Image: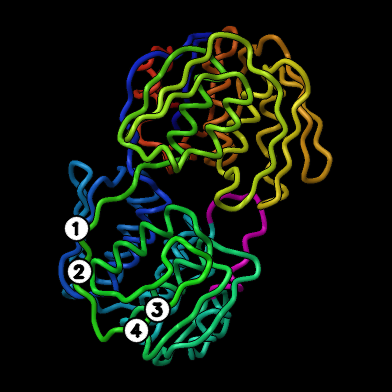
Amino acid sequence: MDRFVIEGPTPLRGDLAVGGAKNAVLPLMAASLLARGESVIDNVPDLQDVRFFMTMLEHLGARCELAYHRLRIDTSDLEGHEAPYDLVRKMRASIYVLGPLLAAVGKARVSLPGGCAWGPRPVNLHLEGMAALGAEVQLDGGYIEASGRLRGGRFRFEPSSVGGTCNLLMAAVLADGVTELENCATEPEVSCLSEALVKAGARIDGAGTTSLRIEGVTELAPLAHRVIADRIEAGTFMAGVALAGGDVRLTGLDPTHLAPVTAVLRDMGCTVEEEDAAISVISTGRPRAVDVTTRPWPGFPTDMQAQIMAVCAVAEGASSLTETIYTDRFTHVAELERLGADIRVDGPRAVVQGVPQLTGAPVMATDLRASAALVLAGVAAEGTTVVNRVYHIDRGYERIEERLAVLGAEIRRERV
Protein backbone atom coordinates (compact mmCIF):
# COMPACT_ATOMS: atom_id res chain seq x y z
CA MET A 1 0.00 0.00 0.00
CA ASP A 2 1.59 3.26 -1.15
CA ARG A 3 1.79 6.55 0.70
CA PHE A 4 2.95 10.08 -0.12
CA VAL A 5 5.57 11.85 1.97
CA ILE A 6 5.40 15.62 1.53
CA GLU A 7 7.77 18.29 2.87
CA GLY A 8 6.26 21.76 3.03
CA PRO A 9 5.52 24.46 2.59
CA THR A 10 6.45 24.95 -1.06
CA PRO A 11 4.81 27.27 -3.62
CA LEU A 12 3.78 25.84 -6.99
CA ARG A 13 5.21 27.34 -10.19
CA GLY A 14 5.38 26.31 -13.83
CA ASP A 15 3.35 24.98 -16.75
CA LEU A 16 1.33 21.76 -16.70
CA ALA A 17 -0.81 20.00 -19.30
CA VAL A 18 -4.18 18.79 -17.97
CA GLY A 19 -5.08 15.17 -18.66
CA GLY A 20 -8.28 13.68 -20.02
CA ALA A 21 -11.40 13.62 -17.86
CA LYS A 22 -12.01 10.43 -15.90
CA ASN A 23 -15.70 11.26 -15.62
CA ALA A 24 -15.93 11.61 -19.41
CA VAL A 25 -13.91 8.59 -20.50
CA LEU A 26 -15.82 6.00 -18.45
CA PRO A 27 -19.19 6.53 -20.18
CA LEU A 28 -17.37 6.64 -23.53
CA MET A 29 -15.85 3.24 -22.74
CA ALA A 30 -19.32 1.91 -21.98
CA ALA A 31 -20.65 3.44 -25.20
CA SER A 32 -18.18 1.35 -27.20
CA LEU A 33 -20.49 -1.60 -26.47
CA LEU A 34 -23.14 -0.04 -28.72
CA ALA A 35 -21.24 -0.86 -31.94
CA ARG A 36 -19.28 -3.77 -33.32
CA GLY A 37 -15.69 -3.11 -34.34
CA GLU A 38 -12.83 -1.06 -32.93
CA SER A 39 -13.52 2.18 -31.10
CA VAL A 40 -10.61 4.58 -30.62
CA ILE A 41 -10.67 7.06 -27.74
CA ASP A 42 -7.86 9.60 -27.40
CA ASN A 43 -6.59 11.63 -24.44
CA VAL A 44 -7.41 8.80 -22.04
CA PRO A 45 -5.76 9.08 -18.61
CA ASP A 46 -4.03 5.96 -17.31
CA LEU A 47 -5.97 5.60 -14.07
CA GLN A 48 -7.04 2.76 -11.82
CA ASP A 49 -10.68 3.38 -12.71
CA VAL A 50 -9.90 3.20 -16.43
CA ARG A 51 -7.99 -0.06 -15.91
CA PHE A 52 -10.86 -1.49 -13.85
CA PHE A 53 -13.33 -0.60 -16.60
CA MET A 54 -11.08 -2.19 -19.22
CA THR A 55 -11.12 -5.41 -17.20
CA MET A 56 -14.91 -5.34 -17.11
CA LEU A 57 -15.18 -4.80 -20.86
CA GLU A 58 -12.75 -7.66 -21.42
CA HIS A 59 -14.96 -9.86 -19.22
CA LEU A 60 -17.77 -9.10 -21.68
CA GLY A 61 -15.61 -10.22 -24.60
CA ALA A 62 -14.06 -6.94 -25.75
CA ARG A 63 -10.35 -6.51 -26.40
CA CYS A 64 -8.80 -3.39 -24.87
CA GLU A 65 -5.41 -1.75 -25.32
CA LEU A 66 -4.28 1.50 -23.68
CA ALA A 67 -0.99 3.02 -24.83
CA TYR A 68 0.21 6.61 -24.93
CA HIS A 69 -3.23 7.84 -23.79
CA ARG A 70 -4.98 6.18 -26.75
CA LEU A 71 -7.51 3.50 -25.88
CA ARG A 72 -8.61 0.91 -28.43
CA ILE A 73 -11.68 -1.19 -27.67
CA ASP A 74 -12.57 -3.98 -30.11
CA THR A 75 -16.06 -5.34 -29.58
CA SER A 76 -16.11 -7.63 -32.63
CA ASP A 77 -16.36 -10.73 -30.44
CA LEU A 78 -18.57 -9.30 -27.70
CA GLU A 79 -20.65 -12.08 -26.19
CA GLY A 80 -21.24 -11.47 -22.49
CA HIS A 81 -24.01 -9.53 -20.79
CA GLU A 82 -23.08 -9.87 -17.10
CA ALA A 83 -20.98 -7.45 -15.03
CA PRO A 84 -20.23 -9.49 -11.89
CA TYR A 85 -19.88 -8.28 -8.33
CA ASP A 86 -16.13 -8.86 -8.14
CA LEU A 87 -15.63 -6.25 -10.85
CA VAL A 88 -18.49 -3.83 -10.25
CA ARG A 89 -17.78 -3.48 -6.52
CA LYS A 90 -14.59 -1.57 -7.33
CA MET A 91 -16.34 1.51 -8.72
CA ARG A 92 -19.84 2.88 -9.10
CA ALA A 93 -19.37 3.91 -12.72
CA SER A 94 -19.63 0.23 -13.66
CA ILE A 95 -23.39 0.70 -13.91
CA TYR A 96 -22.75 2.58 -17.17
CA VAL A 97 -22.74 -0.78 -18.99
CA LEU A 98 -26.42 -1.33 -18.16
CA GLY A 99 -27.86 0.89 -20.90
CA PRO A 100 -25.46 -0.12 -23.70
CA LEU A 101 -25.86 -3.84 -22.98
CA LEU A 102 -29.63 -3.56 -22.98
CA ALA A 103 -29.61 -1.58 -26.22
CA ALA A 104 -27.06 -3.72 -28.08
CA VAL A 105 -27.60 -7.20 -26.65
CA GLY A 106 -31.15 -7.03 -25.35
CA LYS A 107 -30.30 -8.09 -21.82
CA ALA A 108 -28.01 -7.14 -18.96
CA ARG A 109 -27.12 -8.53 -15.55
CA VAL A 110 -25.17 -5.96 -13.56
CA SER A 111 -24.21 -6.14 -9.91
CA LEU A 112 -25.28 -3.26 -7.73
CA PRO A 113 -22.23 -0.95 -7.78
CA GLY A 114 -19.62 -0.10 -5.17
CA GLY A 115 -16.97 2.63 -5.12
CA CYS A 116 -16.16 5.37 -2.62
CA ALA A 117 -17.64 4.68 0.79
CA TRP A 118 -19.33 8.05 1.35
CA GLY A 119 -22.81 9.10 0.46
CA PRO A 120 -26.08 7.51 -0.61
CA ARG A 121 -25.97 7.28 -4.40
CA PRO A 122 -28.99 5.20 -5.38
CA VAL A 123 -29.41 3.63 -8.80
CA ASN A 124 -33.18 4.03 -8.90
CA LEU A 125 -33.07 6.63 -11.70
CA HIS A 126 -31.14 4.23 -13.91
CA LEU A 127 -33.68 1.47 -13.30
CA GLU A 128 -36.78 3.65 -13.63
CA GLY A 129 -35.39 5.14 -16.83
CA MET A 130 -34.78 1.75 -18.42
CA ALA A 131 -38.29 0.68 -17.46
CA ALA A 132 -39.65 3.83 -19.13
CA LEU A 133 -38.00 2.62 -22.34
CA GLY A 134 -39.78 -0.73 -22.11
CA ALA A 135 -37.23 -2.87 -20.32
CA GLU A 136 -38.25 -5.44 -17.76
CA VAL A 137 -36.14 -4.61 -14.71
CA GLN A 138 -35.83 -6.39 -11.39
CA LEU A 139 -33.38 -6.75 -8.52
CA ASP A 140 -32.31 -10.27 -7.65
CA GLY A 141 -29.60 -11.25 -5.18
CA GLY A 142 -27.75 -7.97 -5.41
CA TYR A 143 -27.95 -7.85 -9.20
CA ILE A 144 -29.87 -5.67 -11.62
CA GLU A 145 -31.49 -7.90 -14.22
CA ALA A 146 -32.93 -6.19 -17.27
CA SER A 147 -34.16 -7.48 -20.60
CA GLY A 148 -36.36 -6.62 -23.55
CA ARG A 149 -36.28 -4.66 -26.78
CA LEU A 150 -36.06 -0.95 -25.96
CA ARG A 151 -38.54 1.49 -27.45
CA GLY A 152 -38.79 5.24 -27.33
CA GLY A 153 -40.36 6.80 -24.28
CA ARG A 154 -40.37 9.79 -21.96
CA PHE A 155 -38.55 10.16 -18.68
CA ARG A 156 -37.85 13.02 -16.30
CA PHE A 157 -34.92 12.88 -13.90
CA GLU A 158 -35.81 13.86 -10.34
CA PRO A 159 -33.26 14.93 -9.30
CA SER A 160 -30.93 15.59 -12.18
CA SER A 161 -28.30 12.85 -12.51
CA VAL A 162 -25.09 12.75 -14.55
CA GLY A 163 -24.87 8.96 -14.39
CA GLY A 164 -28.56 8.49 -15.09
CA THR A 165 -28.50 10.89 -18.03
CA CYS A 166 -25.50 9.16 -19.61
CA ASN A 167 -26.93 5.68 -19.10
CA LEU A 168 -30.36 6.47 -20.51
CA LEU A 169 -28.85 8.43 -23.40
CA MET A 170 -26.77 5.40 -24.40
CA ALA A 171 -29.80 3.14 -24.14
CA ALA A 172 -32.02 5.44 -26.20
CA VAL A 173 -29.74 5.83 -29.23
CA LEU A 174 -30.58 2.28 -30.40
CA ALA A 175 -34.18 2.15 -29.11
CA ASP A 176 -37.12 1.95 -31.52
CA GLY A 177 -38.68 5.38 -31.97
CA VAL A 178 -38.16 8.69 -30.23
CA THR A 179 -37.09 9.19 -26.61
CA GLU A 180 -37.54 12.46 -24.72
CA LEU A 181 -35.52 13.03 -21.55
CA GLU A 182 -36.22 15.96 -19.24
CA ASN A 183 -34.25 17.62 -16.43
CA CYS A 184 -31.09 16.04 -17.81
CA ALA A 185 -27.67 16.77 -16.38
CA THR A 186 -25.76 19.32 -18.47
CA GLU A 187 -22.22 18.74 -17.19
CA PRO A 188 -19.48 18.94 -19.86
CA GLU A 189 -18.92 15.20 -19.54
CA VAL A 190 -22.50 14.54 -20.70
CA SER A 191 -21.98 16.82 -23.70
CA CYS A 192 -18.75 14.95 -24.50
CA LEU A 193 -20.68 11.68 -24.62
CA SER A 194 -23.43 13.21 -26.79
CA GLU A 195 -20.87 14.54 -29.25
CA ALA A 196 -19.15 11.16 -29.52
CA LEU A 197 -22.46 9.35 -30.10
CA VAL A 198 -23.55 11.81 -32.79
CA LYS A 199 -20.21 11.32 -34.60
CA ALA A 200 -20.93 7.58 -34.51
CA GLY A 201 -24.35 8.07 -36.14
CA ALA A 202 -26.73 8.76 -33.25
CA ARG A 203 -29.51 11.33 -33.66
CA ILE A 204 -29.56 13.56 -30.60
CA ASP A 205 -31.14 17.01 -30.33
CA GLY A 206 -30.61 19.35 -27.39
CA ALA A 207 -27.10 18.31 -26.38
CA GLY A 208 -25.87 20.57 -23.59
CA THR A 209 -29.42 21.42 -22.44
CA THR A 210 -31.75 19.88 -19.88
CA SER A 211 -34.03 18.45 -22.62
CA LEU A 212 -32.76 15.71 -24.91
CA ARG A 213 -34.61 14.25 -27.86
CA ILE A 214 -33.14 11.03 -29.23
CA GLU A 215 -34.34 9.37 -32.40
CA GLY A 216 -33.25 5.76 -32.30
CA VAL A 217 -31.15 4.32 -35.13
CA THR A 218 -30.60 0.71 -36.12
CA GLU A 219 -26.83 0.74 -35.67
CA LEU A 220 -23.86 2.91 -34.77
CA ALA A 221 -20.32 3.05 -36.08
CA PRO A 222 -17.47 2.46 -33.61
CA LEU A 223 -16.50 5.54 -31.63
CA ALA A 224 -13.66 7.83 -32.69
CA HIS A 225 -13.41 10.62 -30.15
CA ARG A 226 -11.06 12.70 -28.01
CA VAL A 227 -11.82 13.03 -24.31
CA ILE A 228 -12.21 16.55 -22.94
CA ALA A 229 -9.73 17.83 -20.36
CA ASP A 230 -10.45 16.96 -16.74
CA ARG A 231 -11.97 20.06 -15.16
CA ILE A 232 -11.68 18.54 -11.68
CA GLU A 233 -7.99 17.78 -12.13
CA ALA A 234 -7.45 21.32 -13.40
CA GLY A 235 -9.47 22.74 -10.51
CA THR A 236 -7.41 20.70 -8.05
CA PHE A 237 -4.15 22.22 -9.28
CA MET A 238 -5.76 25.67 -9.27
CA ALA A 239 -6.78 25.15 -5.64
CA GLY A 240 -3.23 24.03 -4.90
CA VAL A 241 -1.89 27.40 -6.06
CA ALA A 242 -4.48 29.24 -3.95
CA LEU A 243 -3.45 27.18 -0.92
CA ALA A 244 0.34 27.03 -1.28
CA GLY A 245 0.91 30.18 -3.32
CA GLY A 246 2.70 30.49 -6.63
CA ASP A 247 2.04 30.91 -10.34
CA VAL A 248 0.86 27.98 -12.50
CA ARG A 249 -0.34 27.86 -16.11
CA LEU A 250 -2.57 24.90 -17.00
CA THR A 251 -2.86 24.00 -20.68
CA GLY A 252 -5.00 21.82 -22.92
CA LEU A 253 -8.33 22.69 -21.34
CA ASP A 254 -11.55 24.61 -21.97
CA PRO A 255 -11.62 27.58 -19.55
CA THR A 256 -15.43 27.69 -19.67
CA HIS A 257 -15.48 24.29 -17.93
CA LEU A 258 -13.67 25.89 -14.97
CA ALA A 259 -15.94 28.95 -14.64
CA PRO A 260 -17.45 28.01 -11.23
CA VAL A 261 -14.00 27.28 -9.75
CA THR A 262 -12.49 30.38 -11.32
CA ALA A 263 -15.19 32.57 -9.77
CA VAL A 264 -14.53 31.20 -6.27
CA LEU A 265 -10.75 31.54 -6.54
CA ARG A 266 -11.07 35.13 -7.72
CA ASP A 267 -13.30 35.82 -4.71
CA MET A 268 -10.50 34.37 -2.57
CA GLY A 269 -8.05 36.90 -4.00
CA CYS A 270 -6.30 34.84 -6.70
CA THR A 271 -5.49 36.29 -10.09
CA VAL A 272 -6.92 34.01 -12.78
CA GLU A 273 -6.11 34.70 -16.42
CA GLU A 274 -7.84 32.81 -19.24
CA GLU A 275 -6.62 31.99 -22.76
CA ASP A 276 -8.28 29.98 -25.53
CA ALA A 277 -7.08 26.65 -24.11
CA ALA A 278 -5.23 27.58 -20.92
CA ILE A 279 -5.69 29.10 -17.47
CA SER A 280 -3.08 30.80 -15.29
CA VAL A 281 -3.52 31.09 -11.52
CA ILE A 282 -1.41 33.44 -9.39
CA SER A 283 -1.56 33.64 -5.60
CA THR A 284 0.79 35.88 -3.63
CA GLY A 285 -0.85 36.14 -0.23
CA ARG A 286 -3.17 34.50 2.21
CA PRO A 287 -6.56 33.72 0.58
CA ARG A 288 -9.81 35.36 1.69
CA ALA A 289 -12.70 33.46 3.23
CA VAL A 290 -15.64 32.56 0.96
CA ASP A 291 -19.08 31.01 1.11
CA VAL A 292 -19.53 28.13 -1.33
CA THR A 293 -22.53 25.90 -2.07
CA THR A 294 -22.16 22.86 -4.32
CA ARG A 295 -24.66 22.63 -7.17
CA PRO A 296 -25.13 20.67 -10.39
CA TRP A 297 -23.51 22.23 -13.44
CA PRO A 298 -23.09 25.15 -13.99
CA GLY A 299 -22.80 25.47 -10.21
CA PHE A 300 -19.76 24.74 -8.07
CA PRO A 301 -18.90 21.02 -8.42
CA THR A 302 -19.18 18.69 -5.46
CA ASP A 303 -15.95 17.04 -6.67
CA MET A 304 -14.10 20.29 -5.79
CA GLN A 305 -15.60 20.78 -2.33
CA ALA A 306 -12.83 19.01 -0.40
CA GLN A 307 -10.04 20.86 -2.26
CA ILE A 308 -11.63 24.25 -1.65
CA MET A 309 -12.13 23.37 2.01
CA ALA A 310 -8.37 22.85 2.24
CA VAL A 311 -7.86 26.36 0.84
CA CYS A 312 -10.41 27.78 3.28
CA ALA A 313 -8.45 26.18 6.12
CA VAL A 314 -5.76 28.88 5.74
CA ALA A 315 -8.00 31.74 4.57
CA GLU A 316 -8.46 34.97 6.49
CA GLY A 317 -11.82 34.80 8.24
CA ALA A 318 -14.57 32.19 8.43
CA SER A 319 -15.70 30.31 5.32
CA SER A 320 -18.93 28.37 4.87
CA LEU A 321 -19.22 25.31 2.61
CA THR A 322 -22.64 23.80 2.03
CA GLU A 323 -22.85 20.41 0.33
CA THR A 324 -26.16 19.90 -1.50
CA ILE A 325 -25.22 16.94 -3.73
CA TYR A 326 -23.90 14.38 -1.22
CA THR A 327 -24.70 15.79 2.19
CA ASP A 328 -22.32 13.54 4.16
CA ARG A 329 -19.30 14.19 1.95
CA PHE A 330 -17.16 15.51 4.79
CA THR A 331 -14.95 12.54 5.63
CA HIS A 332 -11.87 14.69 4.97
CA VAL A 333 -12.71 17.09 7.81
CA ALA A 334 -11.17 14.99 10.59
CA GLU A 335 -7.96 14.52 8.61
CA LEU A 336 -7.66 18.24 7.79
CA GLU A 337 -8.09 18.90 11.50
CA ARG A 338 -5.05 16.69 12.14
CA LEU A 339 -3.10 19.22 10.08
CA GLY A 340 -4.38 22.06 12.26
CA ALA A 341 -7.54 23.11 10.43
CA ASP A 342 -10.42 24.56 12.48
CA ILE A 343 -13.64 23.11 11.05
CA ARG A 344 -17.11 22.68 12.50
CA VAL A 345 -19.66 20.54 10.67
CA ASP A 346 -23.40 21.03 11.14
CA GLY A 347 -25.36 18.71 8.88
CA PRO A 348 -24.67 19.60 5.24
CA ARG A 349 -22.71 22.72 6.20
CA ALA A 350 -19.11 23.12 7.30
CA VAL A 351 -17.78 26.34 8.83
CA VAL A 352 -14.03 26.75 8.43
CA GLN A 353 -12.18 29.29 10.56
CA GLY A 354 -8.94 29.95 8.75
CA VAL A 355 -5.64 29.51 10.55
CA PRO A 356 -2.36 31.20 9.53
CA GLN A 357 -0.50 27.93 8.90
CA LEU A 358 -1.18 24.20 8.69
CA THR A 359 1.27 21.77 10.29
CA GLY A 360 2.40 18.46 8.84
CA ALA A 361 1.07 15.23 10.31
CA PRO A 362 0.21 11.65 9.27
CA VAL A 363 -3.25 11.52 7.65
CA MET A 364 -5.35 8.90 5.93
CA ALA A 365 -7.18 9.31 2.63
CA THR A 366 -10.81 8.20 2.70
CA ASP A 367 -11.91 8.78 -0.90
CA LEU A 368 -10.68 10.21 -4.18
CA ARG A 369 -11.27 13.94 -3.72
CA ALA A 370 -10.49 13.84 0.01
CA SER A 371 -7.11 12.42 -1.00
CA ALA A 372 -6.48 15.36 -3.30
CA ALA A 373 -7.38 17.84 -0.55
CA LEU A 374 -4.96 16.21 1.88
CA VAL A 375 -2.13 16.22 -0.65
CA LEU A 376 -2.67 19.93 -1.36
CA ALA A 377 -2.79 20.65 2.36
CA GLY A 378 0.46 18.75 2.81
CA VAL A 379 2.18 20.85 0.14
CA ALA A 380 1.20 24.00 2.07
CA ALA A 381 1.76 22.67 5.60
CA GLU A 382 4.85 23.32 7.70
CA GLY A 383 6.93 20.16 8.10
CA THR A 384 6.29 16.57 7.02
CA THR A 385 2.90 15.26 5.98
CA VAL A 386 2.37 11.56 5.28
CA VAL A 387 -0.76 10.73 3.28
CA ASN A 388 -1.67 7.06 3.65
CA ARG A 389 -3.91 4.90 1.43
CA VAL A 390 -3.18 6.86 -1.74
CA TYR A 391 -4.74 4.15 -3.90
CA HIS A 392 -7.82 6.35 -3.68
CA ILE A 393 -6.08 9.19 -5.49
CA ASP A 394 -4.69 6.84 -8.14
CA ARG A 395 -8.28 6.19 -9.20
CA GLY A 396 -8.66 9.71 -10.55
CA TYR A 397 -5.27 11.46 -10.84
CA GLU A 398 -2.49 10.13 -13.06
CA ARG A 399 0.89 10.29 -11.28
CA ILE A 400 -0.17 13.32 -9.26
CA GLU A 401 3.00 13.22 -7.18
CA GLU A 402 5.21 13.50 -10.30
CA ARG A 403 3.17 16.35 -11.68
CA LEU A 404 3.21 18.29 -8.41
CA ALA A 405 6.97 17.73 -8.24
CA VAL A 406 7.30 19.34 -11.68
CA LEU A 407 5.64 22.41 -10.15
CA GLY A 408 8.10 22.48 -7.24
CA ALA A 409 6.40 20.39 -4.58
CA GLU A 410 8.64 18.18 -2.43
CA ILE A 411 6.63 14.97 -2.62
CA ARG A 412 7.56 11.34 -3.06
CA ARG A 413 5.76 8.04 -3.20
CA GLU A 414 6.77 5.28 -0.79
CA ARG A 415 5.66 1.67 -0.81
CA VAL A 416 4.96 0.26 2.64
What amino acid is labelled 1 in the image?
Val
CB atoms at circles 2 and 4 under 8 Å apart? no
Q: Residue at x 65, y 34 (%)?
A: 332
Q: Looking at the rendered structure, which numbered label has been put on residue 40?
A: 1
Mark 2 and mark 4: Cα distance apart in space:
16 Å
CA gap, disc 3 to disc 1?
23 Å
Residue where numbered disc 4 is placed: 216
Range of the magenta residues?
115-126
Q: Is residue 108 left or right of residue 302?
A: left
Q: Is residue 250 left or right of residue 345?
A: left
Q: Secondary structure at mark 4?
A: loop
Q: Is residue 120 left or right of residue 5?
A: right
Q: Amino acid at mark 3?
A: Ile
Which quadrant is the N terminus positioned in?
top left
Q: Which residue is mark 2?
A: 222
> Residue 214, labelled with which disc?
3
Residue 217: percent from the left, percent from the top? 29, 84
Q: Residue at x 36, y 61 (%)?
A: 193
